[in-house]
Amino acid sequence: MKQGKQMARTAVFMVIAVLASKLLGMLRDVLVAGAYGTTGAAVAYETASRLPILLFDLVIGGVVAASFIPVFNEILVKEGKDAAFAYANRYINLLFVLTAGISLVGVLFSSPLVSLLAPDLTAETHTLAVLLNRIMFPMMLFMALAYALVGLLQSLGEFNLPALMSLASNGIMVLYLLVFNGRFGIVGLAVAMLVGWAVQACMQMPRAYQLGYRWRPTPLTLTPAIRRSLGMALPILVSTWMQPVCNLINTRFASGIAEGRAITAIGYANRLYIIIVGVFSFVATNLLFPYLSRATASGENEEAERLTGLSLKLLGMLILPIAFGAAVLAEPIIGIIFERGAFTAADTTLTADALRCFAIGMPFMAFNEVYTKLLFSRQQPKPAMVTAAAAMTVNFVLVWLLSPRFGVGGIAAASALAMAVNALLNHLWIRHSGTRLLSGRDWADLARMLAAAAGMGVLVRLLWTALPVDRLPAVLLAVAAGIVCYAVLLLLLGESSLRTMLARIFGRKSRNP
């Protein structure tokens, strides 16, 4: 009971911290859009910033936490803190050597990498993208250290500080855009991004020290624990390639649409999509993963399955109405957030087309995060690798088929459908292994949530088009009415989770067992 209350308090803090970070990140994007719109400088920055992030995600990004946390927790449970910290030292030192080598290659071969990612850029935009890319590539060192420390802290029960790190880096970039952008321009923005990642890594070190961790130089020997992590590396990498590979495919096809403006439209829409889903799925999966790893290491498989099923159901209740709302209000939302300065009404229409189609994939992205974390906690990444590879193939085929006819909407729809395929395949694999995460009643509740969210979406769209007020108040009124409508429909349809929560809030016994 005490652990449950602590998890609930931690989850609330993480939601607040992540939401604040996402809102600050949105403000950062608003300021970038207002200053640069979809101009050549914006396209160069968008392309250049994606390269180190994409390469990090493709080469080691998913491995840092996903292979570290299960092995660290297993050693922690079976051998104690000293052995776990010794493993952490070797792991972090190995990451440093690897990311230093990748950063050097990225700086030296920046021009061909930019050409590979966005082959249809003008010569001037290409030159600027190469310069910005060389500034930002070393941030891979700090990204690796930041994620490794996140895994260490979360495994030791510290979730609050990792939830705050993005808030600090986004704050640095917002400060730059408000105060220094007029003087140093887009080049200074690239430097601010590099500094932001350095801060994310450094701010976690004092807390790790307080918890007993001491960094020490160690030889790069392949201990059994490191070999186990490396053995998981390739399957984990492939299984976490879904987002970065889709972004790579999308950017390449978008570079030939609307004179390259589609790159920024896809970028803004995708980040908003990640913000919307990430607030809840980030909290659920990052809080869940260490507990699942520890439960698996201790042989408590039933508890791990219970926590996973509960996370899926709660995410469904939260994400489904958000997805419908984002789809029906895509254009006014983009207009309110971005349409100012160099970001025109035409840019709003282009970006809204992408967000509307990305919304299809929101619930599937959230569910897939939970499925993969369950597989990783069991140190079984190969099924996730196979399903991700299948989904990436689907994404490429659909983008190739849809983008010539439907433009940015076709690109976004392809990514959303590929994410749905990934989630479905992971669910089927887990179910085939004998793990039943959701009961028949849970599935019925999810169906009721879907029906309630669809009904809410119809009401929200009707209100938005009918209200004789300005765009912002119309959206706020439509959203408020939508929230009430969704809750009422859930109650009328007999969905059990909301009834249980309301009963607990008002101190009544729930009729549900």
Image (cartoon, rainbow, N blue to C red):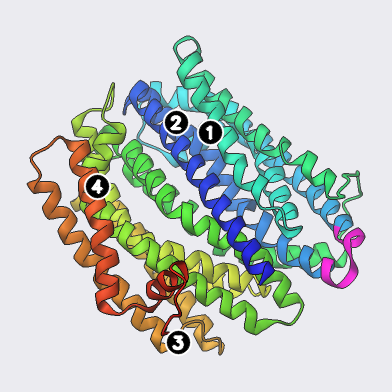
Q: Position of residue 72 (x, y in %)?
A: 78, 63
Q: Residue beneath label 1, please?
A: 170
Q: Which one is in front in this view, the residue at disc 2 or the one at disc 3?
A: 3
Are the residues at dot 4 and dot 1 in contact (C-beta closer than 8 Å)? Answer: no
Q: Which mark is residue 28?
A: 2
- In the image, taking residue 456 as reference, residue 225 lies left or right, namely right
| Circles 2, 4 touching at the beta carbon (< 8 Å) | no
Task: Estimate how packed mark 3 is, as few (under 14), some (14 to 19) or many (20 or more) residues with alpha carbons within 10 Å.
Answer: few
First reached walking from the N terminus: tag 2 or tag 4: 2
Q: Which residue is mark 3?
A: 439
Residue drawn where x is 73% and y is 48% of the image: 149
* Amino acid, disc 2: Arg
Q: Secondary structure at mark 1?
A: helix
Mark 4 residue type: Ala
Please give left or right for residue 92 compared with residue 146 in the image: right
Q: CA distance from mark 2 to mark 3?
A: 42 Å
The residue carrying pointer 4 sits among few (fewer than 14), some (14 to 19) or many (20 or more) residues within 10 Å by Cα, namely many
Q: Give the residue displayed 22% in from the left and 66% down from the top.
A: 454
Q: Earlier in the sequence, mark 4 or mark 1?
A: 1
Label 4 and label 1: CA atoms lie apart by 24 Å
User: What element does badge 2 sit on?
Assistant: helix
- Per the rendered image, the range of residues in magenta is 76-84
Query: How far across and down, in percent of the image, does residue 421 sit?
Result: 39, 70
Spatial distance from mark 3 to mark 1, Cα to Cα?
A: 41 Å
